[in-house]
Image (tube, grey):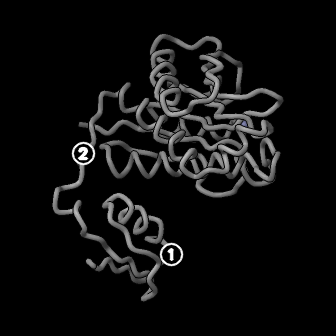
Amino acid sequence: MEKVKIMIDPGHGGRDPGAVANGLQEKNLVLTIAKHIQQTLLQNYHVDVRMTRERDTFVSLEGRAELANAWGADYFLSIHINAGGGSGFETFTFTKAGSKTKEYQKAVHEEIATRLYEKDRGMKEANFAVLRSTRMPAVLTENLFIDHPKDSLRLKDATVLKAIAQGHVNGLMKLLRLTPTRTSPAPAFKGERAYRILINDKQIGAYKETENVLAQVEQHLKTATKIEVQQL
Ligand SMILES: [Zn+2]
């Protein structure tokens, strides 16, 4: 079965920080969320994932859509943080979106809603460039307000960013009716077993959960010359 292609689009980047307030920059928050989504999808599901940017670089709006179109992505998911004096989260499709896109929006929106207790501002439509120029179902999410005191505190909490990412993942997987390829870790990996990870002979941490071990390995794969996983 051919893998579903998902293009994740962390908004802004490089010289465009997006919204800035309370010591936070939108471009950094959305990259963190997008990377969580990418990692979770690749580790647990039979899907192809690309990102319009993997680091702090500038990519134009048309450039983002073009990357998705040229790849032939099946779904486009743009991640943003809101600003301008409100609170809570909302999601967008293009104003002329079809029913398939609306179904996609609903799935993602509902799953984010179950993980965020802040105000649900609703499912909306807008004439945003990345939604207009992409040729596949595309959804843009605005996750909390960077300039709202309480929202910004939540955005400083790594577990909240992970919860937002997980909402996106679960929405997509519900829509695609995909189940994890690796079911819950084998019993042998539960209990007290733990693993120490050494990068270039230097210990960076010890982990019990398989997904955390794999996440660390993946994070260092491109830069490390030697990666060791030792059972404790
Ligand atoms: Zn934005």
Pick the quarter of the image with the C terminus.
bottom left
User: Percent position (x, y) of residue 226?
Assistant: 40, 83
Look at the numbered disc 2 and say if its residue's Cβ is closer than 8 Å to ligand 1: no
Q: Position of residue 150 (x, y in %)?
A: 73, 38
For the residue pair 65 and 80, the one nearer the viewer reads as 80
> Where is residue 189, by image quadrant?
bottom left
Q: Measuring 38% from the left and 25% from the top, which residue is drawn there?
A: 175
Helix, strand or loop at label 1? It is: loop
In-image side of 71 versus 30 (left or right)? left
If the image is split into quadrants, where does the N terminus sit?
A: top left
The residue shown at (61%, 38%) is 79
Residue 27 higher or lower than 139, as above or below: below
- Kindly identify which residue carries mark 1: 223
Q: Which residue is mark 2?
A: 181
Q: Earlier in the sequence, mark 1 or mark 2?
A: 2
**Marker count (numbered):** 2
Question: Is residue 174 found left or right of 59 in the rendered image?
Answer: left
Q: Where does residue 145 sit, x and y in percent of width and height?
A: 73, 35
**Cα–Cα span, label 1 and label 2:** 27 Å
Nearer to us in this view, 94 or 180: 180
Q: Amino acid at mark 2?
A: Thr
